[in-house]
Every structure is written in structure tokens, then in C-alpha cells.
Image (spheres, rainbow, N blue to C red):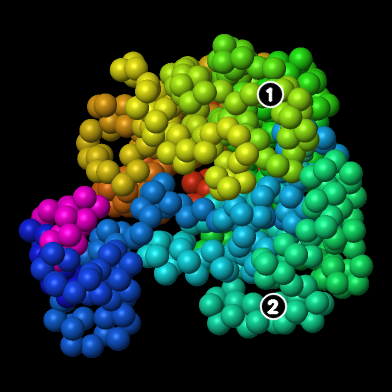
Amino acid sequence: METVIQDIVSALREGKQPDTAWLAKRIRAYNRSVRSMERHIGKLELLAFYRAAKEEAGTLWESWAITPEEDRAILRLLKLKPRRSASGVATITVVTMPHPCSGSCIYCPNDIRMPKSYLSNEPACQRAERNCFDPYLQVRARLALLESNGHVTDKIELIVLGGTWSDYPLPYQLWFMAELFRALDDDNAAAERRREERTAFYRGCGICSEPEELAAQAQELQELVDAGACTYNAAIGTLYSGDTWGRARTIQQASFEELEAAQRANEHARRRVVGLCVETRPDLVDDGSATLMRRLGCTKVQMGIQSLDQAILDRCGRNITVERIAQAFACLRLHGFKIVAHMMANLPSATPQDDKDDYLRLVTDPRFQPDEIKLYPCVLIASSALMRLHGRGAWRPYTEEELIDVLAADVAATPAYVRISRMIRDFSSGDIVAGNKKTNLRQMVDAAGDDAEVLEIRQREIATGDLSPDELRLSSVVYGTSVSQERFLQWTGPDGTIAGFLRLSLPKDGATAMIREVHVYGRVAELGGSEEGGAQHIGLGRSLIECACRQAHAAGFSAIRVISSVGTRPYYRRLGFADEELYQIRGLQAEGEQ
Ligand code: SF4
């Protein structure tokens, strides 16, 4: 293994930039050179070997004489899943407690061990169950894994999943968020103490975290739910009531003061929250819930839309009008949130052409136009109400060709300011009774697309590739929504590769301009100089912000707000933004004005 590390160091010193393909080739050559299969290595072993040498700081480490820059480059190369923090931000997904949902959507899974719509086999759900759905324990478990895989964890985006956030009681919402921040504020020693105490507390309450035992406890009720003889809400009312969870709930509440203290600590913590996302239903979005989400520290909201065809919504039991969905979009936009829409193809009674038309409406109708989309084809899950309808012939899954044709058309129709974050749910194939089971569906869709230029963000992201700052060009895409003019400012390379972007909202009612998102991809942030004020280059993020301020001023706005995350507040203060209760604000003036 030492020879492989030495080869990496040599390559770096020769000015080469060894990438994943280079490393894979080098590892293959090494494995061919050792006879015993037991001595074969992968990135995991290399990373562990490298880290052990570094921690021991013995003669081996000294003999390599690795500089801090080389150390960073080696760790980046040895990361197991480079994409996970390729954007410069590590993502941690946490799951809330099972809780009643006031919806009754027919395709929605009813796994009573999980919050509505999730399945206990999904990776984030497994982690949540093993950690008694405790937010602190979930974050620490994920952090440990990310760090052992060599990922940098100083900037964290938190994604909170679980049915409908706004359905949870306020004290639980406050506690959940305060614990997320605390888990990132605590140093490793304090975190370990808290982890042990918390685990012992849940054990003392009699809460089990063993999947097999939990499955056995839930089995009888689950069978009743699957047969339609008991509702999800009634079942979880039984499963999570009683002394066991009653005792656990005694700690699951916090005040605004406690939350705000944890947030303030995070402003200067080693691991800062740079994004916080919750998911909710459009019928629960209004000024009150949007303001609360902002106080909790949220910057992004995922909404289950699924369809904009009223007949399909009604047939699926969505219990919402298209007009109400439009109101939710307008409300979230005016509050500055990044908006993620969940859309489903192949819902009952939809045709492939309906789905294509529906998607086009989502991305072009000024009442909608989300920033991100999760595009999930409907699949049949045994516990859903659709299972019984399917038995009566009320739904059929698209063929693979039909599905790929719909999704490829959707990708082609996606504007430059929209990111398609996902195309499949994390359901295991064993849970899918009918419908797509291919985990590489996205690659199949990409391969099926025609040669037309794809504008969608994810396909243009610089990820772990290289691009010189000198090749970048700043441009704006302008589009109108029902409540604002939106400007998407982007740094792109000659082939359209995107290195960073900013979302600027100029509300039609003339209120304050709003920066809804600033995103600079990690690799380029390093190339383009420090975002903290590099000497040679102005950071890409900062130049985006200055450009947004100039554009807002030119459009007649006298002030601009930013929906900053808790961990980015100090950065915006340095750029002249002042704290308000929910946002940060900066006055606008022409260059040269005092
Ligand atoms: S899709 Fe959402 S709103 Fe509908 S039942 Fe499932 S969790 Fe509830």
C-alpha cells in the first residue's frame, strides 16, 4: 500500500492531477502485483492505511514529507464516494418519528415503523430506526461515517425527511432542530458523552432499536394495515403510545430560546449548517408556517406536488387544488426559500403524454417553476392503497421504454435554473411489487436523451472535474413568476459546465430584493480563491453576490435580503449584511455613492 501512496505523492509533485480513474488503474496494477487475494486493496484500505500513518506520525509519515496541500489532495482522491461532497458541502439526511399524516394518497406506502411514505429498508430510515429517530444520534452516526470515508464535514446541509414537517407539534419541531444544531456544535468528546447518555436513556425507556425485533413487534398491525383493515394513523397511534414512547417524549421538546442558543453556537462551530431543508405539503404552506420554518433555520422546502392535473390529483386522493399548490409556490418564493418539488410520473390514469405535458407545465408556468425537482416514477408498494386498486386493474406500470421516454423528455425540457436532484426513491427492489426497479434509471435516461444541449443543472455541475477560473464566464438567465422576476446568475465554462450560481428574486410588489441561494461548487471554490477573502481572486460566491446587488439596485430596489443559513451568517456580515430576525439585509447604492 505504501507504494501506491508514494505513487500518488509523486504524481502530485510532478504537477499531475491524479483522478479517480488514475487511482483505479493504479490499484488494479498493485493488486495484480500481489499474488494473494487477501492482500488485494481498494480505496477503503488505502484511506485507512494513509490515515493511520498520519495519526501515528511515525517515520513512515515523516519519510513522505507531505505538505498540507498534498494531504488535502490525497484525502480528496481517497474519498470513497466523491460525489457526496463534490458540491463542497456534505449532506446529512435525518428522519423524524412516525406521526399521523392527514393525507390519504393512494400510492403512499404505509410502513408503520416509519413516518408516512417512507420504508424501513431505505438507508436513512434504517439509520433513524437504529438511533431511535433521535436527531442528535442520527447526525453523529452520519458524521462518523462521512469522516471515516475521508469527507470534509465543515459545511453541512441538513435534510429532514418524514411525512409532513408542519404536521408535527411545535415543541417537537423546536427540539428536533435544536438537537440537529447541537450535534454539529459539540466537539467529539462532548458528543460521545451525550451519545452514551442518550442511548442509555432510550434503553431505559424500553425502546428497541433492533430491526428484526421491531419488525416482529409491528408485524400483526402491519398485516392489518396492508389488508386495509386498519389505517396507518390508527396503527402508529397504537405502536407509539404507552409508557415506552411516553417517557421518551418527555425530552423531546424545546423552547425557542434553547433553539436560538444552539443556532448561535453553530455560527462559529467547526461544523456549520449551510443549508437546512424540511418537507411538507402545499396545503400547509402559508405565511405563518413559512415564518416558523424560517425561525427554525430552514432555507429550503420540499413540497409533494406529484401532479398538476386536477383529475389525477383527485383520483390519487391528494385532496388539494392546483390553485392551492400555486399559492404555496408564491408564498415560499416570497419568503425566500429554495423550492424543491416532488413530481411523480405514471400515476393512476396518467398517460406518458399527460406526464410530459404536466412536467412542462411545472417548469414553464409562472405559478410554479421550482428550483429543484425530485422526479419519481410511481411504483407499487405492498402496504399502499394502490395495491388493492392494482388488483382490480386500475393501474399498470409503464414499460421501461415508456418510462425512459417520459423522463428523457422531462430532462430535455428542464431550464438552466432547475436541478433534477433525483429520479428514483431509495426503495429496495424487494419492496417494489411492480414498477421500475432499476437503480441506474438516471444513467439509462441520460443515455437515451438526444444530442440536444441539456441545460439542467445536475448534468452541468463541475463535480470533481477541473476547470480553470480563467475559463469561467458570468451570465444571467431571467424568467418571470407570478410574484417576481427571477434572475439566475451563473458562472459557466466554455461547454456550459456550471461552477457556481445565485438565485435572485425581485418581487413584483416592489418589496425588498431577495437572494434565495448562493452555491459554489467545492473544487472551483478552491481554485477561484478563498470565499473568506482570498488575496488573488475574488471568490466566485462573493462576485455572484456583488453582481446580484448591482442588478437589484439597477432594477430600482433600495435593499436586498439573503435567506442565510445559520452557519453562513458570519460570512454575510463580512459582506455588509446586517442581521434581522429572519434574514440578513444590506442597503443598496450605486458604486461611488456614500
Ligand atoms: S404522499 Fe404525503 S400527504 Fe400523501 S399520504 Fe403520503 S405523506 Fe401523507
Q: Nearer the viewer, residue 46 or 498?
A: 46
x and y percentages locating residue 49 in the rendered image: 28, 76
Q: Residues within 10 Å of mark 1 (few under 14, many from 20)?
A: some
Looking at the image, tell me whether mark 2 or mark 1 is earlier in sequence order: 2
Q: Which residue is mark 1?
A: 395
Residue lying at 72% horizontally and 28% vertically, measured from the top left? 390
Residue 240 found in image quarter: bottom right
The answer to whether 249 appears left or right of 400 in the picture is right
* Residue 561 visible within the image: no
x and y percentages locating residue 587 in the rendered image: 58, 36
Residue type at mark 2: give it: Thr
The answer to whether 378 appears left or right of 59 in the picture is right
The magenta stretch spans which residues?
15-30
Residue lying at 22% horizontally and 40% vertically, measured from the top left? 468
The alpha-carbon separation of the residues under discs 2 and 1 comes to 44 Å
In the rendered view, tell whether residue 211 sits above or below residue 23: below
Q: Which residue is mark 2?
A: 199
In the rendered view, tell whether residue 276 sits above or below residue 39: above
Q: Nearer the viewer, residue 437 or 173?
A: 437
Magenta region, mostly helix, strand or loop? Answer: helix
Q: Residues within 10 Å of mark 2 (few under 14, many from 20)?
A: some
